Image (cartoon, rainbow, N blue to C red):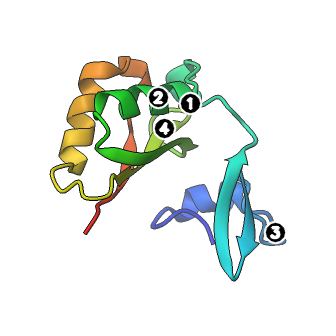
Amino acid sequence: MGYLNMPEESRTVVSSDGILHTGDMGRVSCGVLCYVCRSRHVVKPKGYQVYPPEVEDILLRNLNNRASAIAVVGAPHETFTEGIMAFVEAAQGCTDLSPEEVLSVASKSIDKFSFLSYQKFFPQH
């Protein structure tokens, strides 16, 4: 359990009894872990305060209904105190949205200190 391909960061957030402390809250339903909410609403990259709901709203607006869901969370970063990670799901039937497009929209619409360090893109098929 932990961050994919990031063993050092995983050691800092997984307790000795196997609990993952990410700041997000979830529940297990039918054997699947479901995201419920955040316990923390501020990400602090480079010492700035970034509010994930604001970044999510800006991205959703500027992607013009081509994303059905966006979740922004803090993630370990090798240089900054914390990076910003966005999980983006393309809207049903949307085939023209790509990870590159998400980064392009982000670069034009959000502050530099709020810029995405990482993203995970879920296309529609």
The quarter of the image holding the C terminus is bottom left
Which dot, 1 or 4, sits closer to the camera? Answer: 1
Q: Earlier in the sequence, mark 2 or mark 4?
A: 2
Q: CA distance from mark 3 to mark 2?
A: 36 Å
Q: Secondary structure at mark 2?
A: helix
Q: Are marks 1 and 2 in contact (CB under 8 Å)?
A: yes
Can residue 12 be spotted in the picture?
Answer: yes
Label 2–label 4 contact, CB within 8 A: no
Type of amino acid under label 4: Gly
* Residue that badge 1 annotates: 53
Is 91 on the left or on the right of 7, as rendered?
Answer: left
Distance from Cα at disc 1 to Cα at disc 3: 31 Å
Q: Which residue is mark 4?
A: 83
Q: CA distance from mark 1 to mark 2?
A: 6 Å
Q: Secondary structure at mark 1?
A: helix
Residue at 38% from the left image edge and 36% from the top image edge: 116
Disc 1 versus disc 3: nearer the observer: 1
Residue farthest toward the right in the current orientation of the protein: 17
Residue farthest toward the bottom in the current orientation of the protein: 31
Q: Amino acid at mark 1?
A: Pro
| Three-letter code for the amino acid on which mark 2 is drawn | Asp
**Residues under labels 1 and 4: Cα distance?**
15 Å
**What kind of element bears circle 4?**
strand
- Mark 1: few/some/many CA within 10 Å (<14, 14-19, 20+): some
Indicate the position of residue 74 as horizontal and vertical percent values.
56, 41
Residue depicted at 63% across the width and 72% down the height:
1
Residue where numbered disc 2 is placed: 57
Foreground disc of the pair 2, 4: 2
Front-lying residue, 86 or 15: 86
Whichever of callouts 1 and 4 sits on the residue coming sooner in the sequence is: 1
The location of residue 118, given as percent across then percent down, is 38, 46
